[in-house]
Image (spheres, rainbow, N blue to C red):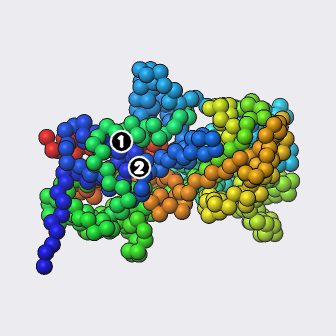
Amino acid sequence: MNTVSPAKKTVIIIGAGIAGLKAASTLHQNGVRDCIILEARDRIGGRLQTVTGYQGRKYDVGASWHHDTLTNPLFLEEAQLSLKDGKTRFVFDDDNFIYIDEERGRVDHDEKLLLEIVDNEMSKFAELEFHQNLGVADCSFFQLVMKYLLQRRQFLTNEQIRYFPQLCRYLELWHGLDWKLLSAKDTYFGHQGRNAFALNYDSVVQRIAHSFPQNWLRLSCEVNSITRESSLNAIVKCEDGTIYNADYVIITVPQSVLSLSVQPDEDSRGRIGFQPALKPVIQEAFDKIHFGALGKVIFEFEECCWSNESSKIATLANSTNEFVEIVRNAKNLDELGSMLEKEESKKHTSVTCWSQPLLFVNLSKSTGVASFMMLMQAPLTNYIESIREDKEHLFRFFQPVLNKIMKCLGSENVINGMNPEEDHTNVNKPVLKNIIVSNWTRDPYSRGAYSACFPGDDPVDMVVAMSNGQDSRIRFAGEHTIMDGAGCAYGAWESGRREATRISNLLQ
């Protein structure tokens, strides 16, 4: 019986996201000439994905910003390139938020509500709760906000009690999780500088991908297993039957996909089997870190006919006067929780666009494009992405919140202009031409967005376990494998460079 010998490679990189691409670029720069990148999708970029919409407009449905721009090495590299060639690669779109409630309308910069000041105190309250006293048990962000309300209610007005909790929930759109799922310890975090909106990440992806030989890239190639047969090599088997023999392997798949490797179901698409199994310290780390489902919806309009006062608009989840009464009357935190659960059980209402906070980026102000980029969180992301092809359904779902935003921005109700047979030209009203929805929760090679913390989680264990690798030759990279830049594109980029540099040094 004839058997095909495995193809020999010095380094195999699994995943062509920004971590895998940067690893390949660094290896090539350091003199490695025998490398291959195996990517399960039919495209490169991973969770960086730029799509084209109405009239050729471009949007990032994955990562969109360069965060921590004081210390972000990827951003600083982009900035230097912009100085050299004069190309605009990003814009700083930080802005004062407009906050909108369904009933009341705008509630930002209100001289009586002063919600922004209360929000600042809440962030300080969280800092004191967990950092001034050691050993304080974690809880959900929802529970922490309720604790703040209970302790500070005598200093808050009824309207502040009603609207503030919904305002501070804009943080859900950083983590991709509902406040009842989100770790209170992990909710607030320091920013190392402003945020720069990328124009667009596809240019970053292509720039890095063209810094090494194109024949290193192999798309639509799903990896099934990785086996250490000796102290000197690893055998990588692919879905199509291809087998590779590698001196080193760098695995850059998302944490949400890698977690399948510790599950017994071997039929899960994207799952990589390890022989021997992943180290116990890695398996245990998965119990202390989870992932959020940050999704995006792009609303494309014919032209901008609304105010560009701000590039950031947050709509608040509905609140009631009954909630205020409960907070005022509760004797303690346990009773407050019980009373709120009882009140919640009475509602039995279906999810609407006002059931949770949403963040709208007014691209007309930041980039000159007549569109809104909306960020949403789990569990809403899972639902909206499941109906992403039904644009009429999507329009009906979001129509009330879009109309409210337009009213607050001095415009009129949105006109559904997605039917190509209808002519809405020369109409000075917001005419919606297209809706684009991300697909991260339904993509088997993403299974969400990026790493996030549930109450009681500790991401440090995962970062330490991942940075130490499975062994000296099977390594890991990605946003979940690094402390500085965790959850960010530049963190993944830096982790790819880290592992490639390590291997390059060993090969010298």
For the C terminus, the quadrant is top left
Helix, strand or loop at label 2? It is loop
- Residue designated by label 2: 44
Position of 378 with respect to 96 (left or right) is left
Q: Taking 454 as reference, is 420 left or right? A: right
Label 1 CA crowd tier, 10 Å (few <14, some 14–19, many 20+): many
Q: Is residue 468 above or below residue 425?
A: below
Residue 49 coordinates in the image, percent (x, y): 50, 47
The residue depicted at 13 percent of the width and 79 percent of the height is 1
- Foreground: 234 or 327? 234
Give the CA separation, mark 2 to mark 1: 8 Å
Q: Amino acid at mark 2?
A: Ile
> Can you give x and y, in whole percent of width and height, for residue 425 in the image?
79, 40
The residue lying at 77 percent from left, 32 percent from top is: 307
**Residue 412 image label:** none
Q: Position of residue 287 (x, y in %)?
A: 44, 63
Q: Residue reaching furthest front? A: 421
Residue holding disc 1? 209
Up the image or down, 420 lies above or below 311; here it is: below
- Quadrant for residue 29, please give it: top left
- The residue positioned 30% from the left and 45% from the top of the image is 214
